Image (tube, grey):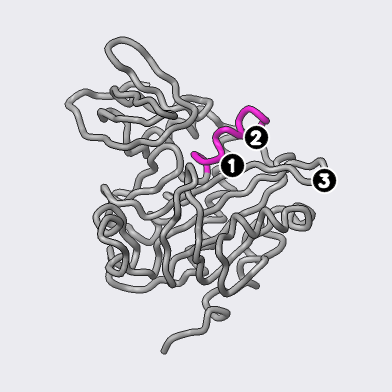
């Protein structure tokens, strides 16, 4: 029997078992990040807050890209007052990496027989297929700073209905295991791991970076990264303590704070970082 959108999430369980203090729920939204920005001031008053929807129609990705989603995907945004985080202002550059590793942890709890990895700066992959996109933003309102972490995970949606170019490079939990999942359980897992990874990054940065690099899809691979209008090509050596992607090209080392990885492939060289 199908369920209405309002029944998809147990909001009481989310509030009872996670760090979230307030949930802004809408059955349909264009973008949870856009709604979070529009309501930033009151959401910050109840930080950490959650903007949640059963269906997102115009999600935003990195560099203004559109995030394709359909009914059954888990799409939400977490709004956080940065002063409450165990991260220094400099460590906030790790926001996307922290979020990606937390989602990786959560997906791994449900997809136990596959390799789940993070891909710098803001994606989660199962094998060579993307299963989650993350958009972390910082905005100010009324003299206060606010962090918005938008997360879109392909949970119960099937990518068989997606455009062909998306089907070739993306997957969902449903498509991987041919069954549906409790989206509330997935959401609670993501939020629980996110709180844990924030604490680890702030208090045990060395161990956090070691785990992030161990779970990083690109380490040791030959990559092409688009930075503005330029391309940087070389071997990925890992992610440094500022969240930069480290690329070595013919003895020259590049540390990239932003960019889009447009291609990668395995080379027979062991990475070091």
Read off the residue under disc 1: 198
For label 3, count other residues whose C-alpha is less than 10 Å away and answer few (under 14), some (14-19) or many (20+): few
Badge 1 marks a residue whose secondary structure is: helix
Give the CA distance from mark 1 to mark 3.
Answer: 25 Å
Give the CA distance from mark 1 to mark 2.
Answer: 7 Å
Q: Is residue 64 left or right of residue 129?
A: right
Read off the residue under disc 3: 142
Q: Main secondary structure of the magenta part?
A: helix
- The residue under the point 36% across, 37% down is 216
Most foreground residue, 203 or 47: 47
In the image, the segment drawn in magenta is: 88-98
- The reply to whether the C-beta atoms of the residues labelled 1 and 2 are less than 8 Å apart is yes
Badge 3 marks a residue whose secondary structure is: loop
Q: Is residue 193 left or right of residue 133?
A: right
* Sequence-earlier tag: 2 or 3: 2
Q: Disc 2 or disc 3, which is closer to the eye? A: 3
Extreme residue in the top direction:
251
């Amino acid at each position: 029997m199908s369920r209405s959108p309002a029944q998809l999430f147990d909001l009481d369980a989310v509030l009872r078992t996670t760090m979230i203090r307030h949930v802004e729920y809408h059955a349909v939204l264009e973008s949870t990040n856009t709604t979070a920005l529009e309501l930033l001031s009151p959401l910050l008053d109840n930080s950490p807050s959650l903007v949640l929807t059963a269906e997102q129609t115009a999600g935003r990705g990195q560099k203004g890209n559109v995030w394709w989603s359909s009914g059954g995907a888990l799409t939400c945004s977490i709004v956080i007052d940065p002063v409450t985080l165990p991260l220094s202002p400099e460590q906030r550059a790790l926001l996307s990496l922290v979020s990606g590793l937390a989602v990786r942890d959560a997906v791994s709890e449900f997809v136990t027989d596959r390799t789940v990895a993070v891909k710098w700066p803001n994606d989660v992959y199962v094998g060579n297929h993307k299963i989650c996109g993350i958009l972390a933003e910082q905005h100010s309102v009324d003299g206060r700073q606010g962090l918005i972490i938008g997360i879109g995970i392909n949970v119960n949606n099937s990518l068989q209905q997606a455009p062909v170019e998306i089907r070739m490079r993306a997957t969902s939990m449903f498509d991987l295991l041919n069954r549906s999942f409790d989206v509330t359980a997935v959401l609670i897992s993501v939020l629980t791991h996110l709180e844990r990874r924030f604490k680890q990054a702030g208090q045990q940065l060395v161990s956090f970076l070691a785990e992030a690099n161990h779970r990083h899809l690109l380490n040791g691979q030959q990559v092409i990264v688009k930075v503005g209008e330029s391309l940087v090509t070389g071997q990925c050596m890992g992610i440094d303590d500022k969240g930069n992607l480290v690329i070595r090209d013919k003895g020259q080392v590049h540390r990239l704070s932003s960019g889009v990885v447009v291609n990668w492939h395995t080379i027979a060289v062991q990475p070091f970082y």
